[in-house]
Amino acid sequence: MAVLVTGGAGYIGSHMVWELLDKGEEVVVLDRLSTGFDWAVPDAAELVVGDIGDQDLVREVLRSRKIDAIIHFAGSIVVPESVSDPLGYYLNNTVKSRALIECAIECGVPHFIFSSTAAVYGTPVQIPVKEDAGLQPESPYGTSKMMTELMLRDTAAAHNFAYAALRYFNVAGADPQMRTGQSSKGATHLIKVACEAATGKRPFMEVYGTDYPTPDGTCIRDYIHVSDLVAAHYLALGHLRAGKGSIVANCGYGNGASVHEVIAAVKKVSGKDFEVRVSTRRPGDAVAIVANADRCRETFGWQPRHDDLEEIVAHALGWEERLSQRNR
Ligand code: UDP
């Protein structure tokens, strides 16, 4: 019995692989290495380089490695890029997920965990947002993930198949042991960008819009430490294996931080005062998104261990410094 982690050479996927190995699981990674790195996959996991849309390859892997669960991270994740390339996002996140789910059904893989997103809510009417809120994605990214959730729902109703769709809020930080972290080049996510500015990798950073209807005018997000996120996945896997049925759950802490607050935390923790320029709003950005995480806590017994913005930033900075040494 083994777990297949798609996108396991990427940021969140590589943390998941470590979590599974730490728990004694056998792990196979499927990754085409378009944005991930082979060195991010621990030696104890098997790396298969290939595309999740290659059904012959996926069927072969599912059958020969006796996979009982798929944890599906592979996909495209940049909201503004999805606005300019919607069809690319529907291909990577929706069409290829469909191909992967079909292989799971054909090969009798009963458990599936899907990396969904808070972007399925768009700008929630009520904050903190609960899982039963209406889905109103405001970007092709959010829509591409919502469509996969719907495919999973309908597939689970028709087949011997149960899934967990975990809606991530803003994932940041790095493995506290510094075994992996966020390594992708051309980063666009706020904490990574600010850490790059703090470590001198960019001369300045920009704040996309200070005229939002929030206390300081910048957007509010719920930042969750990547290690707490993957811990929730492992608990979700136990839930599915115990036959407790499909579930959709938010993964966030229920705390909001504004863009200005995040930048202040990065400056404080790093002790570096980098230049911050005010820029215009970025297309596709929702004003404020904060999770109601009761379901995750109550159903899985999830207890976050790193619910602290400065700790998240400290780990992200630690990894950024490691990366600088690596690339030197
Ligand atoms: N943001 C920013 N400057 C940056 C990157 C992001 O002001 O260099 C803002 C962005 O407009 C949004 C928030 O930070 O309001 C979080 O953006 P991110 O891309 O990290 O995640 P998203 O919520 O879009 O998935």
Image (tube, rainbow, N blue to C red):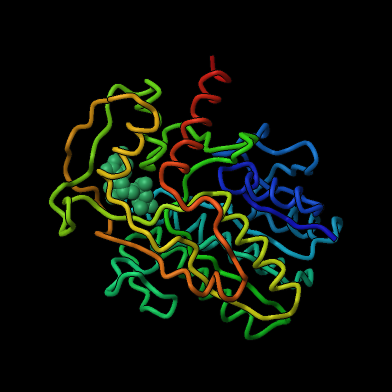
Vertical arrangement, residue 230 with respect to residue 206, above or below: below
Q: Seen in the image, is 145 located left or right of residue 216?
A: right
Which image quarter holds the N terminus?
bottom right
Q: Seen in the image, is 238 located left or right of residue 302?
A: right
The single residue placed furthest to the bottom in the displayed view is 157
Examine the rendering and report whether any part of residue 295 can be seen.
Answer: yes
Q: Number of labelled discs?
A: 0
Q: Point out residue 326 in the picture as x, y percentages from the top left corner.
A: 58, 20
Q: Point out residue 117 in the picture as x, y percentages from the top left corner.
A: 45, 62
Q: Nearer the viewer, residue 236 or 281?
A: 236
Examine the rendering and report whether any part of residue 85 can be seen.
Answer: no
Q: Which residue occupies 27% across, 59% down? A: 286
Q: Seen in the image, is 56 located left or right of residue 204?
A: right
The single residue placed furthest to the left in the displayed view is 211
Q: Point out residue 77 in the picture as x, y percentages from the top left corner.
A: 45, 50
Q: Point out residue 144 in the picture as x, y percentages from the top left corner.
A: 44, 63
Q: Which residue occupies 52% across, 50% down? A: 306
Q: Which residue occupies 34% across, 55% down? A: 221
Vertical arrangement, residue 134 with respect to residue 308, above or below: below
The quadrant where residue 235 appears:
bottom right
The quadrant where residue 132 appears:
bottom left
Which image quarter holds the C terminus?
top right
Q: Which of 34 and 290 is in front in this view?
A: 290
